[in-house]
Image (cartoon, rainbow, N blue to C red):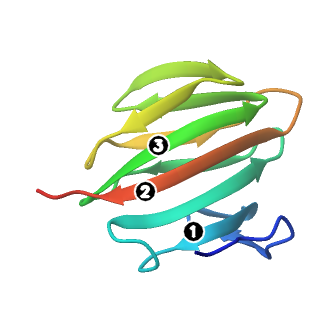
Amino acid sequence: MRISPADAPWSEVSHNAAIRKQVFVSNGEVPNITQFARSVFQPGQVAPGHSHEDMWEVFLVTSGVLTVEVDGAVHRLEAGAAITLAPKEVHELRNEGPEELHLTYFGILSSD
């Protein structure tokens, strides 16, 4: 058993150092899970377009509105909605709203 405290340290998101995240499970701690974390995007912040060769990602919007562009298609997700991204899907995450955007997410290594 492992308990992750609510006051786990905050660090930078690799795709934009201005966006903060709390990592509750790090790569290697649980088989096939690369990370379980939450992030806070301030209004106007963007995690630029990128993809992952061997990882699925699942994002849950816990507050605010996420604008996510996946392979050129734009989607708006409100609190309570989730999106699952497959390996190699190019995605960009944006907070285009006036309020903070809170995301909870995890990555899963692809078995392919």
- Horizontal and vertical percent for residue 13? 63, 65
Element at badge 1? loop
Q: Amino acid at mark 3?
A: Val
Q: Residue at x 85, y 39 (%)?
A: 100
Q: Work out whether mark 1 precedes mark 2 in sequence or the reverse, and give the earlier one.
A: 1
Q: Quadrant of residue 43?
A: top right
Q: Amino acid at mark 2?
A: Gly
Q: Nearer the viewer, residue 31 or 79?
A: 31
Mark 1 nearby-residue class (10 Å; few <14, some 14–19, many ≥20): few
Per the image, the residue denoted by label 2 is 107
Look at the image and tell me whether residue 26 can be seen: yes
- Nearest to viewer (mark 1 / mark 2): 2
Q: Quadrant of residue 4?
A: bottom right
Q: Report the disc number at residue 58.
A: 3
Element at badge 3? strand
Q: Nearer the viewer, residue 88 or 10?
A: 10
As drawn, is 83 to the left or to the right of 105? Answer: left
Q: Residue at x 71, y 53 (%)?
A: 39
Element at badge 2? strand
- What is the distance, in whole Å, between disc 1 and disc 2 at their CAs? 14 Å
- What is the distance, in whole Å, between disc 3 and disc 2 at their CAs? 7 Å
Per the image, the residue denoted by label 1 is 14
Q: Could you tell me which quadrant the N terminus lies in?
A: bottom right
Query: Is the C-beta separation of discs 1 and 2 under 8 Å?
Result: no
**Residue found farthest to the left:** 112
Q: Residue at x 47, y 31 (%)?
A: 83
Query: Is the C-beta separation of discs 3 and 1 under 8 Å?
Result: no
